[in-house]
Image (tube, coloured by chain):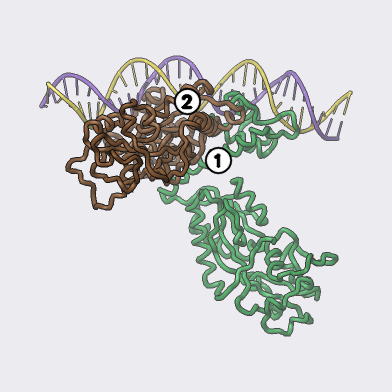
Chain colours: A green, B brown, C purple, D yellow
Amino acid sequence: MTITQLYYVLAVAENQNFTKAAEKCFVTQPTLSMQIQKLEDQLDILIFDRSKKPIELTEIGKKIVTQARNIVNESYRIQDIVDQQKGFIGGEFKLGIIPTVMPTLLPMFLKNFIKKHPKVKLKIEELTTHEIIARIKDGHLDAAIAATPLEDESIKERVLYFEPFVSYIPVGHRLHVNKKIDVTDLDIDDMLLLEDGHCFRDGVINLCKVFKNQIDDNFQLESGSIETLIKLSNEGLGMTLLPYLHTLEINDKEKENLHYFNEPTPAREVSLIYHKSELKMQIIEALQDVISGVIRGAIAFQNVKIVSPLPK
Amino acid sequence: MTITQLYYVLAVAENQNFTKAAEKCFVTQPTLSMQIQKLEDQLDILIFDRSKKPIELTEIGKKIVTQARNIVNESYRIQDIVDQQKGFIGGEFKLGIIPTVMPTLLPMFLKNFIKKHPKVKLKIEELTTHEIIARIKDGHLDAAIAATPLEDESIKERVLYFEPFVSYIPVGHRLHVNKKIDVTDLDIDDMLLLEDGHCFRDGVINLCKVFKNQIDDNFQLESGSIETLIKLSNEGLGMTLLPYLHTLEINDKEKENLHYFNEPTPAREVSLIYHKSELKMQIIEALQDVISGVIRGAIAFQNVKIVSPLPK
DNA sequence: TCATTTTGATACGTTTTGGTGATAGTTTTT
DNA sequence: AAAAACTATCACCAAAACGTATCAAAATGA
C-alpha cells in the first residue's frame, strides 16, 4: 500500500470515473486502473463497484476512502511541518469567500497579501457557506472567509471583524423619517432579501425575529447581489439591510438613505475558518495578520450584538 | 514520500542506529540509508544528526517522527477496516500484562482464546504499568491488561473484573486473631510490599492511607513476586496483601492465614486497555469476551471499593 | 598509539515497480 | 446499428528500490 495508491482511490471516488480521475492525477488511465487493482488485490476486497454506471464505492470502499483521506491529508502535514520550521510561507492555497464578503473585503487585502507573501499561490473562489463547509471538510479548500459562528465540530474559526448591519431605506418608506433604526422596527415582509443560500439572508431573517409561522412567499423580492437590492430598493420596492463595508462604496445620493441601528448594533461576525486539522497554519496566520491589519481602522463600532448566520 | 520511508525513519529513530533498524525492517542497511537520504533530500532538511553517537533526531526530525508514527499507524488501519468487514480475527497481536495479574489470569483464558481464535498470533509480555503505557502509546503493544483507572487521555479502558484484596496474616501477628479485617487495621510499617514499580504495591500503599510524611524505608522488606511475599510472611516478617485470584492457588495450610476484608471490600479494577485510536478492535473485543467468560463465576464479590493503582 | 570494530555512506549491478501507448472488450449514447 | 465513452489488459520502458561489495570515519580497546 502506498500513499499514491490511496490518492488514486480518492480521485476515482470523487470523480466516479477512472479516466477523469487519471487526468486529475496527471497519469494515464491504465496506471490508475492497475494501481487500484493492485491495492484491491492486496487487501483482497473490491473498493469500487464497476458494474454501476457511474462507478460506485462498495460498502467497504466508503470506509477505506474515509481512512485514505485521513492518511493522505496527514502525509501533507509532513511538508507543512518542514515549511513551518523553515518559516517558509508559500505554495498553493485555496481560499473560499462568501459572496457578500468577497467584493468589499477582497480588494482591501489582496494586493497587500500578494506583496507580503509572493510565494503563496492564492486560488480564491466565491462560494456559499454551505459549499465552503463541505469543501473544507473534503480538503478542497484550505481555508475560507465566512460569517460565523458555524457551530461545526470539525471547523475552527478565527474572528476577523464584526461588520454591522446598516438599513437602507428609500425615500417614501414608512421608516425613512427615523434617523436611527431599532431592531424592533423591522418587518420581514417589506424587506428585500438575497436569494436562498446566502448566509447574509439568513442573518437578516434571524435579526427580524420572525414569529409568524412562515414568511409570506407569495411575492417576495429576492436578488443574487447586494447591488441589485439597492437598485430595487430605490425603485420603492422596500427597504433592505446592507453589511457595513458595502455602505462605503455607494454614491453620495444613496448614502442619504442609510440609517444606522441603535446600540447594540446588530452585526455579523466574519471569520477566517479552516479545518480542525490545522493544515497550512502558517499561511492561515499570515492571512489573518494581513486582513486584521487592513480592517483595523475601517470598522470602529463598539457595542455590537452578533447575529447568527445559520438558518434556524 | 512513501509510507515505507516513514517506517524506516521510525525504525532508525527507535533504534538510534541504521544497521539495527535495517534488520528490524528486513532490508539491508544501504537500502535504509538511501531511502532516508532521499526523503531528507526531498524535504530539504536533515531528520537525523549523524554527528552524534548514537545518532540523534534533529529538532525538526522529532516533529517528523511524531507525524510519521501517525501516518504509519493510520495506514495499518486500512487493513484493520478490511479485517473488520470480513469478520476476520487474526494476525499478530501484542498483549502486555502486569506481573501481579499474569500468573493467575493468563492460564485461565489463554487456552480458551487460542482455541477460539487460532488465527491470532498472540505475543504476550510481562510489563509494569509504566512500561505498558509507554508501549501502547508508541504502538509496540496492541493492548494490555492492567489495574485501572489510569487517567490517561490517550488510553481507553474496558473493565474486565474487580479483584478484591485479601489479607495474608501469619500466625503470631497481632491481627491473626481477627476473623475479618478492616482497612483501618492496616499499618504500612508491618506490611510486606512488592518492589517499586508494581502497581499492586501502589494500590496497597494507597489502601493503607499513609499519613506519615514518608514510609520508613530503613528496613522495608520488598520482593518481586507474591509467592515470595507469602514465604516471607510465613517466616513471621509481617503480614501482606494478596490479590484475590492468587488466594485460589495457595495450599490449604496457608489458606488458614487468609483474612477477608469487611465490606466494602477493597479491590483493584483490572481492565483491558488500549490506545484511543482503537486499532485491532476486533481482537480486543474477542479478548474481552473470552476473559469475561472465564472470570464470570471465578469472582463473586458484591460491594467492592476500588483502590487506585497509581502512586499518589 | 595503533589495530580492530562499528557504523554510515557510496558505487554499482539486479530486480521490482510505476508508468505509457496501443488495443480489446463493455456498456451507454445517439 | 454505429458511435462514443469507459475500463481492463498487454507489451514495453524508465525509474526506483534493493542487494552486494566496499570505503571512510569514528569509536573502542589493547
Instruction: Output the chain of dot 1.
Output: A
Asked which quadrant contains residue A232, the reply is: bottom right
Badge 1 vs badge 2, beta-carbon distance below 8 Å: no
Residue shown at 44% from the left, 39% from the top: B162
In front of the other: A214 or A95 = A214
Horizontally, residue D5 falls left or right of residue B131, namely right
Horizontally, residue B217 falls left or right of residue D12, namely left
The disc placed on residue B129 is: none
Would you say residue A91 is visible in this rendering? yes
Location of residue A250 in the rendering, given as x and y in whole percent from the top left corner: 68, 73
In front of the other: B21 or B284 = B284
In front of the other: A203 or B245 = B245
Location of residue B241 in the rendering, given as x and y in whole percent from the top left corner: 32, 38
Residue under label 2, please give it.
B92
Instruction: Output the chain of dot 2.
Output: B
The amino acid type found where label 2 is placed reads Glu
Element on which disc 1 rests: helix
Above or below, A133 against A41 in this view is below
Location of residue B247 in the rendering, given as x and y in whole percent from the top left corner: 37, 31
Residue under label 1, please give it.
A70
Location of residue D25 in the rendering, given as x and y in whole percent from the top left corner: 24, 31
The amino acid type found where label 1 is placed reads Asn
- How many angstroms separate mark 1 from mark 2 (CA)? 24 Å
Element on which disc 2 rests: strand
